[in-house]
Image (cartoon, rainbow, N blue to C red):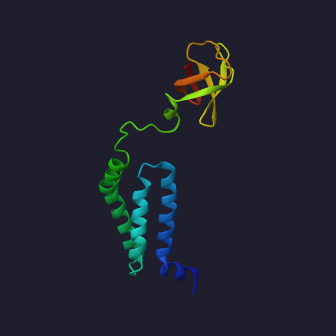
Amino acid sequence: MGIFDYFTQNLWQFWAVVAFMLLILELTSGDFFIICFAIAAGVTSVLSLTGLPFLWQLLIFAILAVLCLFFVRPVMLKYFHRNDPDRKSNADALIGQEGRVSETIVADGHGRVAIDGDDWKAVSADGGEIGEGTKVRVVGRDSIIITVEKC
């Protein structure tokens, strides 16, 4: 038995690996987009055990992925993000958080602020100096540089 014969007889393994990899990718995003493809791959994996030809498997995968995008994803977004319509992600979630100056922010210059174990390059909102150890609140950001004010 050649390698090609093995894979054509065991396509369920291919679909199972694809589903597993897509689930891992979904963990990085949390937007319930990739999980639609993972669900489609998982169902296709089970259906491939019936001996369906590969082209039928691809068609089923595509149809299920589209159906999940239109029917499953909106329900999951509504259920899991129901209390947070303006959900902020990444650096935008920093705005409003408080931290401590870990390196003095010099007047009209930069310093460093520690927030939840991360150290951010920071500038003062009013352009003044903020000494090390001062408690500050994030009021804005420009790329990876945050703007802070004294609490």
Q: Is residue 81 above or below residue 52?
A: above
- Quadrant of the snapshot with the C terminus: top right
In terms of depth relative to the viewer, which is nearer, 63 or 73?
A: 73
Residue name at image x 29 percent, y 56 percent: 71
Res. 51 image quadrant: bottom left
Residue name at image x 66 percent, y 19 percent: 105
- Residue 133 in the image, given as x and y percentages of width and height: 66, 23
Q: Is residue 44 above or below residue 26?
A: below
Res. 103 image quadrant: top right
Outermost residue, bottom side:
1
Residue name at image x 35 percent, y 52 percent: 76
Residue name at image x 48 percent, y 82 percent: 9
- Residue 68 in the image, given as x and y percentages of width and height: 34, 58
In terms of depth relative to the viewer, which is nearer, 45 or 129?
A: 129
- Residue 112 in the image, given as x and y percentages of width and height: 66, 26
Q: Is residue 57 above or below residue 150?
A: below
Res. 150 image quadrant: top right
Number of marks in the rendered image? 0
In terms of depth relative to the viewer, which is nearer, 3 or 109?
A: 109
In terms of depth relative to the viewer, which is nearer, 87 or 143?
A: 87
